[in-house]
Image (spheres, helix red, strand yellow):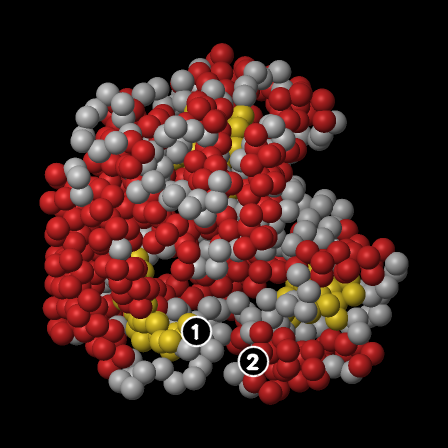
Amino acid sequence: MLDEVLKDEIQTAYRRVLEGLELTPRYGQRLMIAEIARTLGGIESDDERRRTSDEHVCVLEAGTGTGKTLAYLLAALPVAKARGKRLVIATATVALQEQVLHQDLPALKAHSGLSFEYALAKGRGRYVCVSRLDSAMEGGEDNPTLSMFEQSLDSGGDDFQKLVQSLGEAYGNGRWEGDRDSWPDAIDDSHWRKLTVDHRQCTNRRCGHFGACAFFRARRHLDTADIIVANHDLVLADLALGGGVVLPDPGDCLYVFDEGHHLPDKALNHFTHRFAVGGGLRWLGTLKKSLSELNQNLGQQHTLARLLATLPQAIETLEPRLGDAFSLGHQLAGRPDGLHDSEDGAQHRFEMGRVPDAMREVAETLVTIFGELSRTLESMSDILRESLDPEKNTGLPREQAEPWLPLIALLHGRALEAHALWQAFAEPDPVDDPPRARWLLLERFGGEPELTFSASPVSAAHTLARSLWGRCHGAVVTSATLTALGRFERLQERAGLANRYRYQRLPSPFDYSRAILSVPPEAVDPADRDGHERAIVDFVEALGESEAVLMLFSSRAQLRGVEKALSRERRERVLAQDRLPKRELVERHRERVDKGEGSILFGLASFAEGVDLPGDYLTHVVITRLPFAVPDDPVGATLAEWIESQGGNPFMRISVPDASIKLVQACGRLIRKEADEGRITLLDRRVLTRRYGRALLDALPPFTREIDGVRQSS
């Protein structure tokens, strides 16, 4: 139970914030504060948590208008400080991260009476490497990494050198802190790659520029912060490295995952392995050509000389085996004579993730060779790092070792990635668990065919349960849409959240009866493709002249078809996705509404989430089709096959719950403030004719319903 001192501190801070910001207390917000405080405040220690019911995670669905950011900050911060833990706020989007950093935390600090420090955490790749910047300012001619790899790429010429000089001057005089995102102009990816390093390439305290390092300066700020603002990707990347590398150890953290419905997909991306055969052959070929240079510069150290002597044989063995993989991949995809001309290339997925025996045998061989190569490069990296330490005598001078470490570390990382991919292809899947998804992608780059092998788990649940929920001191997962069909089971299944954790749907402050949910007589079953498109065109033509409309399409082809079929006069009112950047489209829409003109936004799935048009800026949301996602991506298709093989129905288990979440999100575009009102129109008759339709409708907020023109109670 939450002790009285903490309870009083939280209540006092909440009262002060309400008074200071002149806010009205909200019932859902108070419930959210209480639930978070009860969950996190009830954890006295890891040992005690394990002895009790292990309710150290709470999952809270809190709709728009609840004030959830303020709620979780007020509830979790005092608990974190009292327990000696760090509060990590992880968001899924840059927009929410900026809101937390620049609005919510300053307001909390100014009005709550709570004393705390906060900092933004970013990955190493967002910061300039001072050593690389210094080398680039001097021309980088004595850096063998440049001579081996980067000179074969576009050097950037004068533009790159101008950028380097500007960055160097700004960093040297303190006008810039080395953070890519804080530089006033966009920096080209190819330029930035030459100015940053990953965790393997970084020499940490052994670097001669360690005292001036932008990344470690930011890390030192994190060490003193009570609240660390990060994103889902950084938390997952840190966990993939073992935890506690960039962020504090999970056992020392209380996490809040805002926009938590994104977490399972973000996690899957982190656990996917890829290997491009052509790219692998190219970096191996470059390494092969540079062996004499490596021996000349590093061969004086006897262990390095011995390790270097193993590389020619490894490369000679790998090249034909990768050639075999390339040939087999083309045969399996039905393209033995190479790629036909195609912009998108071709994809071949292995049914149920099963790899043919011939491919598995090649993979097993590649696992062994890449494993040996990884160990060789790791040993070389270790020696080069030790050579930077003045207290250690490796027999290699620092000035010779330092330029080579970034390259060897880079190759080590690539070898590890290759080993992980081929291991995923070689290993059989556990009998009772879902299989891995495995697939090939054939593309063309510069006229040359490229074959990429990919493998991914079909669910991140097991990994999240083990590495996140099982290790953290406590966690909150929150979002406006966490339930599917009104239940948390789909999120539990995807995110590895245990039944014993605490789950709650919080009441919304909005009166949803102010909005009408309409399924009009014009609604058509999308199975009649032409009829459905004609119905949408007719509906758009009949819209009121002054309406502010958001029309959501599930297909880019249908969006374009409807736009093309409209009359010229009506088409002039349409602002269609892809014609302009999303932000500019929304701004133009607002400008039209401000002038008293009608405006119609045409958007795809990305417009169903994150678009905020309160009040008169949006009075009508039109959903052209129920947002069913066809599981044709390799991961979704493999999972669907496995569910079917177990006697399940993938449509009811995956497609319908996921459509429910997306439908709630789409409808959520309309009511953004307490006074908002308007209409939501669904032009898909299946919601009335199919057995899942009632479940989809019942999972929506209690809008006033109008079916075929007849008003109903919700």
In terms of depth relative to the viewer, which is nearer, 98 or 60? 98
- In the image, is 697 to the left or to the right of 500? right
Q: Amino acid at mark 2?
A: Asp
Tell which residue pokes out farthest to the right in this image: 595
Query: What amino acid is at disc 1?
Result: Gly
Residue 397 on image: x %, y %? 25, 31
Looking at the image, residue 44 lies above or below residue 189: above
| Corner quadrant of residue 418 | bottom left
Q: Nearer the viewer, residue 214 or 559?
A: 214
The residue at 30%/64% (across/down) is 282
Q: Secondary structure at mark 1?
A: loop
- The numbered dot on residue 446 is 1
Report the side of 692 relative to 579 (left or right). left
Q: Is residue 95 above or below residue 168?
A: below
Q: Which sits in the foreground, 12 or 246?
A: 246
Q: Which residue position is annotated with label 2?
A: 525
- Residue that appears at 35% across and 19% down: 44
